Image (cartoon, rainbow, N blue to C red):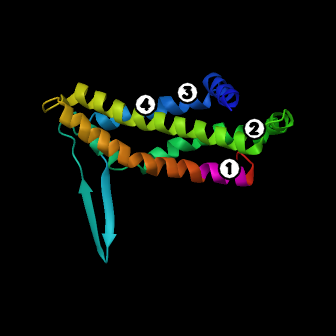
Amino acid sequence: MLNLIRADIYRLAHGKIMWVTTGILTLFYILGGSGKFTPTFRTTIGSNQIEQAGKILNGSQAPYAVMASPEFLIYFFLPALIMVAGADFSSGAIKNTLAKGGSRLRFYFSKLLLAYMAGTFFDVLQVGLSLISGTIFLGFGRALNAGYFEKLAETFLLQLPLFLGVISVGIFIVFLTRRMA
């Protein structure tokens, strides 16, 4: 199973999709953490539309503002998910992998584990880049102590199962259809 994961990491590192996705994600979070583009939440309750616009005042608020609307991170999961799980089905490489004597369960689990690692990497990138860019553009704005990092880690870890659930559903759909499209 480690050989399958290692081969997929090699393929991802030498392919364009992972680098382009990471580059766009990096730009997106640098701009989001800088305070120039803050998320606006709109909701309709009954016939009333409620709008809440958050303004980032300092760098310590930037990761929380970016984590407040995590739905766009799901779109960044899609290219990695398709590249990790769907590439073997479209090229026919799954026949060679299974013909070598590997089980389907081991193959599917290795793909799921690699997609989890890619999703966790994107999630850590989300928090780290917004914190760094917010601090550079706006200053940190509060005492840098263990309490801040503890609260940040708690918020980060609470969102991690959501992202891993989305990745699991995506992997399931790719394995069910057995197509990259």
Q: Which residues are magenta?
A: 170-176
Bin the neighbour count of mark 2 within 10 Å (Cα to Cα): few under 14, some 14-19, many 20 and up. some
Report the amino acid beneath label 2: Asp
Is residue 143 positioned above or below 57 on the image? above
Q: Nearer the viewer, mark 3 or mark 2?
A: 2
**Quadrant occupied by the N terminus:** top right
User: In terms of sequence position, does the residue under pointer 3 or pointer 4 come before the other?
Assistant: 3
> In the structure shown, which secondary structural element does the residue marked by tag 1 occupy?
helix
Q: Nearer the viewer, residue 20 or 172?
A: 172
Question: Do the numbered discs 4 and 2 sit on residues whose CB atoms are within 8 Å?
Answer: no
Tell me if label 3 and label 4 are in contact, CB under 8 Å.
no
Estimate how packed mark 1 is, as few (under 14), some (14 to 19) or many (20 or more) residues with alpha carbons within 10 Å.
some
Q: Earlier in the sequence, mark 3 or mark 2?
A: 3
Among the 4 quarters of the image, the one containing residue 73: top left
Q: CA distance from mark 1 to mark 4?
A: 26 Å
Q: Secondary structure at mark 3?
A: helix
Q: Is residue 167 magenta?
A: no
Which amino acid, mark 4? Thr
Mark sitting earlier along the chain (1/4): 4
Residue that numbered label 4 is attached to: 26
To which residue does mark 1 refer? 174
Query: Of the residues shown, which amino acid type is indicated by label 3?
Result: Trp
Residue 180 lies, in percent from the top left, at 71, 45
